[in-house]
Image (cartoon, rainbow, N blue to C red):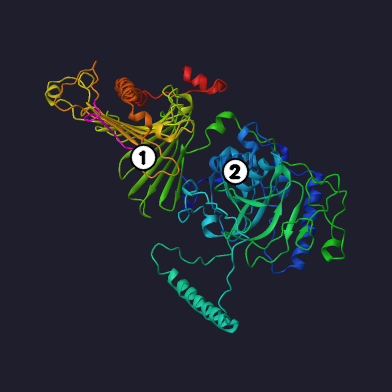
Amino acid sequence: LCLPHHVSDFDWSSIDTSHLPSSYKTNSQQEKELLQLADHFFQQYTHLCPDRKPLFIHPLNECGVQKFVSTTVKPTLLPFPDLYYWSGCASFVCDYLIMEPLKCPITPPSSLYSPTTILKYQRGNCFDFAVLLCSLLIGAGYDAYCVHGYATLEMCFLDQTQELCPLLRKPPEVPEEEDPNKYRIKYPLDPQSKFELQQKAKKEEETESAQEEEREEEVVTEVGMPKRDPLHGLRVHAWVLVLPGKRKVPETFFINPFTGNHHSTTDECFLGIESIWNHRNYWVNMQDCRKGCKDLSFDLSDSICWEMMFSESKELSQSPTESPNKDTDDMEKGEIDTSFEMPLSWVTQIRVSCREYENPFSRGKKVILYDKAKLEKWAAFANEDGLVERLTVYADSDCTEELEVKEWFKHREDLLYMREVNKQTQLITDHFRPGHPLLLKAHSYTSLEPETGHTVEFYHTARVDGLWKRFENATEMTEYFVGREDFLHMRHIEFGERDKEMENGGITADANPRPIVQIKEYFHRNPEKPADEDIEERVFMVIDDVIQLTYHLELHDTIASKVVFCRVIGREKREDEIFLSRENTVKYEPWSSEKHKNMLHLYDLLWELRAEQKELKHHVRDSEAEMLNILMVREDEEANIKLSVSMYSTAKRGQQQE
């Protein structure tokens, strides 16, 4: 659980360091020289900048030995595809490790353990998170740096209860740009006095400043608003800086290792930077941070903005941070020779097994609290139903009334990957990946019982009939089509009530089907036909024995042409007989096609419609049977959930066989 305000009960002093290699317990001659040079740099820094806080240069490691921070970074590329990208590395670090707050919130820690020890015990503070993440990013080819700086209370303690959950953020809408008309008449604006405009703007500024002061006074008293932090701007935090250039990174950005989120360098949560480092060098920020990090320059080759500890030679420099020509500054005089080489990292190779990578949560699951939302995460195969993530949205900040629940699944044989539950209406929507035997894409329902209101979406490109959506309840059914040759795009069926005597007699629904009252079909325009011969709407009133055709309109028409075939009053209906009369059974408008005035043509058309009506009845019964089959299959899949294991996952396949 990611509970930000608790103090960890883990005792780091009790860990066993006897098995660690000698590089953890002693310093080589080159490392000793490096520490002397770092001390010399630190003395110059404190002399020239007496008001600045002490630098984080050579803390103690887990064996109580001083180590330079750059040598604690161990560039490593782990053999997992997701860890080749910064987002995968950040997600792994924030999920695998348990956050521990700094013992003193306004000073950096006195120790910095190796990434291997941090991975072993799966916990650490922000500096441990940052060093491990930076090691993975540099190994993946990014120009990454650890940052020692200052941040807000919420970021330092991993308090996201005031933030919107990233899964609920809507993508920004791109406004449609209207092409300006250069021939538009531009009318002259009403003349206005510049002095009056200046006075008006001045008054608005005064009122705004007064309103802001009132708001600041009310912030503390308002319910649900965070109180002012007395240590604002002093809380120490560590994160990762990624510079552009390598791996086609377009712009500089920050990564908060506690959350794995991407942040702009202008984010107001970051309040200042003391220093940065990677596996090759160490830089001290010489810029003013009174306005946070938004105005900082991250050109590390600029000696005015960044003071480099060691001048890099051309052979060693692997990043666009080469030092400029030497100046006559006091600190430049104290620089070491460019022939100095940074010692190799004292940390052993970082290793993560497949089992550890696939099960990153040491406590079984991870819980993150957001503003009116809670996100829960599990490892793959931790739950029998394949559940790996659940987002619960609440109506209040106390998280008592649930509004919506979203669940994500992995490795299910029924290809279900997401489920949405509306707690207000109890509507459930299941989403499926391509490949389901029934070609399901989504299924919305409140119950798996038939005729209780179901909406099913299909992967229509895999269906012969082009059906992409079907809705059915006890009284109606609506089908939607895409890309059909006959231009049909919707079919609506209305049902009547079943025979109650047969229903009370215990006869099943299959033997007592719902009577079909009406079938409506809607067609798109067929450009190859004249509009008055191209049907737009076709209505079969089955019980009333009425067929109505409505045709498309031409561009200049306002009323559509119609043809209606009605039942003959006082005449018994026979399936093999068609009685056609101009006076009683056919109604058409005078602007209809000339063909409709031909009785023989209307007779042939009525024969075709009768045959199509029979086919439509069979199609409706087939659709009902398909819906029943879908519900039976889904009920069986939910009752017998099976998870699929990749043929390349030998460990999981062994567990499955057991």
Residue 90 image label: 2
Residue 560 image label: 1
* Left or right: where 416 falls relative to 289: left
Q: Which residues are magenta?
A: 581-590
Q: Is residue 442 visible?
A: no
Image location (x, y in percent) of residue 291: 63, 66
Circle 2 residues within 10 Å: few <14, some 14–19, many ≥20? many
* Left or right: where 100 falls relative to 466: right
Given residues 154 and 510, the one toward you in this image is 510
Residue 389 image label: none
Magenta highlight on residue 587: yes
Image location (x, y in percent) of residue 21: 70, 36
* Left or right: where 305 falls relative to 611: right
Q: Nearer the viewer, mark 1 or mark 2?
A: 1
- Local SS, label 1: loop
Image location (x, y in percent) of residue 489: 41, 33
| Up/down of 628 relative to 107, above or below | above
Q: Earlier in the sequence, mark 1 or mark 2?
A: 2
